[in-house]
Image (cartoon, rainbow, N blue to C red):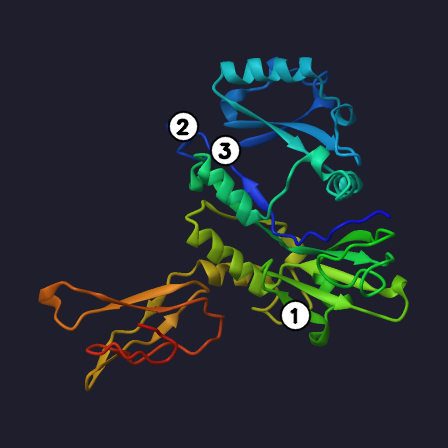
Amino acid sequence: MRRGRFWEFLWLGILILGTSSSKAGLWTTGYYPGYRQTYLPSAAIDYGALTHIIHFAVAPAADGTLNSAANGITPARSADLIAHAHASGCRVLICLGGAGSQAGFRGATSPANLSNFVGIPSADGLVKTLLAAGMSAQKLSVGIAFYGNVWAGGTGTSTGGAALPRQSWVTAPTNTAIAFFDLISMYHQSNLYHWDTNAQAAYLSIDSPGAANDRFISFDDEHACRAKVSYARSKGLGGVMIWELGQGFRPDQPVGKQAPLLQAVKQGMETPRFDLPRIRGTDLELTFTSLPLATYQVDWVANPAAGVWNPLTWGSLALGAPSPSAIPARSRTARNGFTG
């Protein structure tokens, strides 16, 4: 019996940033396929225009091994690239994957072959591993997908076919990428929507009569976008990255609502803002006008001269939650969601 897993789509991008005052602190990365090295020799590249170059690409094989021949990468070609790039102060990375590698990844990450491939933790687990190894948090970013993946059919799951996260199967379901605008118009219904609190990811679950009609659709919605921005901020990461803007655009919607995912990212990036505090009796009233998804701490003090501040916290707010107000100025009794 062949078994597999569903992987929620919380990408992690690793940006190995260089320092170069001549490039004003910006990095420029170029892909360089192995199959282009005869056409464009590595000695002919202007490395002064680049901070990083990515050798493209080794591909995962279904048994968990790596296939370097798929894109023409050889030890000699990699050594030649590294020698010329390093001589010019340009860093070299290698890419794993590329178009058409989905089947290889599915086979390589199946329970039977994962140990031959690599242990792939959650994005949070990978961030923690990299930080513990000394990687600068500012060199890491979290990926946001303006698309989803449709897992269809399959047999031997708890629902017959693919319909839920983290299912195992006898016959593997098919997996097809779908743009966010198509996903919403073709599949989205409120009764099918679910939020996976463990993965911090949205999905649609379609459990229809007959395994062939079952669907599990994992995607980033507005909540997931805000959650990823909040995660990047809480971990002190460099930021987030999006693939790709066009798939999140819905021209049939009213102006102002045509790019809901990008707007969610924008809202998540906002700085918390509040009106000037107002004193009402023994209470200090604080009204927020902007409050992105995050964990907040508000400190208060009864005697500023004493310099002893007391924290009040309110965690993980959803967009649209009522603004906190009436924060006690002289009491540890908290209201409106704050705890002292």
- In this picture, residue 267 sits left or right of residue 151: left
Badge nearest the viewer, 2 or 3? 3
- Residue 315: quarter of image: bottom left
Amino acid marked by disc 1: Gln
Distance CA(mark 1)–CA(mark 2): 43 Å
Q: CA distance from mark 2 to mark 3?
A: 13 Å
Q: Which residue is mark 2?
A: 20
Q: Position of residue 207 (x, y in %)?
A: 81, 69
Report the residue marked by disc 3: 16
Residue 316 sits in which quadrant? bottom left
Q: Residue furthest left?
A: 305
Near-viewer residue (186 or 255): 186
Q: Residue at x 12, y 71 (%)?
A: 303
| Cα distance between the residues tagged 3 and 1 | 38 Å
Q: Does residue 60 lie above or below 229 as drawn?
A: above
**Mark 2 Cα shell of 10 Å, populated few (<14), some (14-19), many (≥20):** few
Question: For this rendering, which residue is in front, 156 or 239?
Answer: 156
Q: Quadrant of residue 112?
A: top right
**Depth check: 70 or 261 in front?**
70
Q: Quadrant of the C terminus?
A: bottom left
- Residue pictured at 50% horizontal, 13% vertical: 87
The residue indicated by pointer 1 is: 253
Amino acid at circle 2:
Ser
Indicate the position of residue 93 as horizontal and vertical percent values: 58, 27
Is 264 placed left or right of 134 in the picture?
right
Q: Circles 3 and 1: CB distance less than 8 Å?
A: no
Residue 288: image location, x then y, percent = 35, 73
Of the image marks 1 and 2, the number of the one nearer the N terminus: 2
